Amino acid sequence: MRPWLVRNLAFAASFLLGSSALAADIYSPMTPQAQETTTESGWTFSFAPYFWAAGLSGDIEQFGLPAVDVDASFSDVFDHLDFALMATAEARNGPYSIFGDAMYIKLSGQGGTPRGILADDVELATETFAGLLGAGYAIYDDGSSRLDIVGGLRVWSVESELSFSGGLLDGRSRTDDATWADGMAGFRGTYSITPEIYLTGWGLVGAGGADLDWDVAAAIGYRFSDTISAVAGYRALGVDYSDDGFVFDVVEQGPILGLVVRF
């Protein structure tokens, strides 16, 4: 198999996320508690679409091929990006919170074969979904800063398809996929510097289907109004999954940008 195809397989199979590609996991703690709008029931709600310009490094193994060492910048991944959708949401009532994050990424690449006997062209398409659902409790809250302890479940699904055109394999395709879930726990918090400017961050770690699943980030936010805020920062996420010849051991990291809408 051509090195081009192996590289595309590695890039596509491992880009989330997510990305995860939050800012993956930009939660509404990016908005200071002192400035949240509260409903009559005591609940506050927020929704945050985001963008994560993540590079990628690690090891990928699929389709029975040897493991491939990947080291790709965001521009390398972006060249093969077909579609990406990422958003988070949170509901909070006093010290209690429920939050979720969902990311869907689709990538593809195509290239010719050296002699065109088995196939004239080979196309690789990869779809990745990562979804996190969790709950939190504020263990410290003084009106301008807050620290939550959180726990939840992250579900991963990665599916790749090789399709052949021309030659002896014309019209044939092969799929390799894996789905798993990891229990996650950690902390997240905010600190208001001024009524408009605030800091936020989180750190999560877990395991389950994967041997290790972790996620850390730090960002600064600016509140434009009672309902709109913007955030910018840096995030790193890693997962180490292997099962029956399917290996997904990667670290993604890069700058994050997000828009938070509160209602």
Image (cartoon, grey):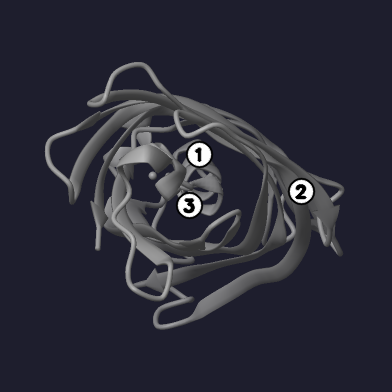
- Which residue lies at the image location 52% right of the left edge and 62% below the top edge? 99
Q: Residue furthest bottom?
A: 171
Query: Which is nearer the N-term, disc 3 or disc 2?
Result: 3
Mark 2 secondary-structure assignment: strand
**Which amino acid, by three-letter code, is at mark 2?**
Ala
Which residue in the structure is indicated by mark 2?
185
- Which residue lies at the image location 36% right of the left edge and 63% below the top edge? 45
Asked if the residues shown at circle 3 and circle 2 are in contact, with their CB atoms under 8 angstroms apart, the answer is no
Picture layout, residue 68 above or below residue 220: below
Q: Which mark is residue 42?
A: none
Residue 20 placed where, x, y %?
48, 48
Closer to the eye: label 2 or 1: 2
Which residue in the structure is indicated by mark 1?
7
**Which amino acid, by three-letter code, is at mark 3?**
Leu
Closer to the eye: label 3 or 2: 2
- Which residue lies at the image location 50% right of the left edge and 78% below the top edge? 173
Mark 3 secondary-structure assignment: loop
Closer to the eye: label 1 or 3: 3
Query: Which is nearer the N-term, disc 1 or disc 3?
Result: 1
Is 67 on the left or on the right of 226, as rendered?
right
Residue 94 placed where, x, y %?
54, 57
Is 66 on the left or on the right of 15, as rendered?
right
Alpha carbons under labels 2 and 1: distance apart: 33 Å
Q: Is residue 72 visible?
A: no
Which residue in the structure is indicated by mark 3?
17
Estimate how packed mark 1 is, as few (under 14), some (14 to 19) or many (20 or more) residues with alpha carbons within 10 Å: some
Quarter-of-image position of residue 85: bottom left
Alpha carbons under labels 1 and 3: distance apart: 18 Å
**Which amino acid, by three-letter code, is at mark 1?**
Arg
Residue 131 placed where, x, y %?
55, 64
Q: Residue furthest left?
A: 225
Alpha carbons under labels 3 and 2: distance apart: 19 Å
